Amino acid sequence: MHRIVVLLVPPVVGFDAAIAPTLFGAAVDAEGAPLYDVTVCGLGDGPVSATTGFDIVTGAGPDVLATADTVIVPGTQYPLARESATLGPEVRTALDSIRPGARLVSICTGAFILAAAGLLDGRPATTHWKFADALRRLHPDVRVDERVLFVDDGDVLTSAGLAAGIDLCLHIIRNDHGAAVANAVARYCVVPPWREGGQAQFIDRHLPAADDSSTAATREWALSRLDEDLTVERLARHACMSPRTFNRRFREETGQAPGTWIRHRRLDRARELLESRDMSVDEVARMSGLGSGGNLRHHLRRGVGMSPSSYRRVYQGV
């Protein structure tokens, strides 16, 4: 069983600390057996102080990190990392015990811990939009993107602020075990399987003017028509905007260009069909709006590193 260890660095953000144990603990197979072994650890044997007025009693000490397949660092106000880009010996020793090849994940300001350890150098990453400039200033070698809800860079993944940790954990479950398992976890947690838009929609300076309409209704409309020709002009007409205004507003609200967003949603739809339906690759491509089997193969290899047949074998066992 895949072992996940959640490392709490005090003072930990209490909300963030609960995300991974809740979501990964709810992931089960068709027979109801758990798919992850989740352990929460601290830097020592005592309780871990949280930022929200309580302490957390963990189930293990830092020695369990050496057994982890995935290590998750929730948000923290740990002053050395947040203010001077350094780590104390207890945090450094804990991180050094993680075995090579383990997947590393941060939620919110947990990115400051990974960055201070040099684990984000040269990589794209994100954190809470409010603290993105501080992360960029302290770690100029990290390619900080505060517009997105999370960044998946293969073996290192980072989420934006607070609830974006839920989006990232669902993304990991979906990649590990398919959309059906991730959707079941989302239903249990009473959250959407994926959230439209990005962190940009919450940043103060990116809030739309009060007299501007949103592209949200058009995005919802487009999701039911992914197999159709969805040009910027057509989307703009539906939103009753000029193409220029629509393109600007769309980027403000989602952090992506309309064409990029549509392509990602079509790939999501193709993956769902490959996981749940017995149809040809060409038919999956047609129904998801990717056009041809060759186009689907290209985008699937680029997005998840697998061919359609390999992807289907992994998630359907056929």
Image (cartoon, grey):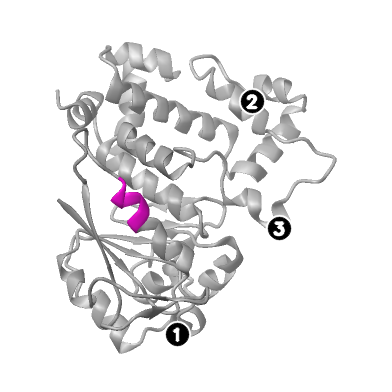
Q: Secondary structure at mark 2?
A: helix
Measure the alpha-carbon separation of dots 1 and 2. 46 Å
Label 1: which residue? 80
Q: Amino acid at mark 3?
A: Asp
Q: Amino acid at mark 2?
A: Val
Could you tell me residue 155's position as x and y percent? 28, 55
Name the N-terminal-most of marks 3 and 2: 3
Q: Amino acid at mark 1?
A: Leu
Kindly give the residue lying farthest to the bottom in the view shown.
Answer: 89
Position of residue 170 relative to residue 113, above or below, is above
Q: Is 243 situated left or right of 275 in this image?
A: right
Could you tell me residue 260's position as x and y percent? 52, 34
Total label count? Answer: 3
Q: Which mark is residue 204?
A: 3
Q: Is residue 157 visible?
A: no
Secondary structure that dominates the magenta span:
helix
Residue 92 occupies quadrant: bottom left
Label 2: which residue? 232
Q: Is residue 3 visible?
A: yes
Measure the alpha-carbon separation of dots 3 and 2. 26 Å
Position of residue 272 relative to residue 210, above or below, is above
Residue 141 occupies quadrant: bottom left
Which residue lies at the image location 23% right of the left edge and 30% below the top edge? 311
Q: Mark 3, residues whose alpha carbon is within 10 Å: few (<14), some, or many (≥20)? A: few
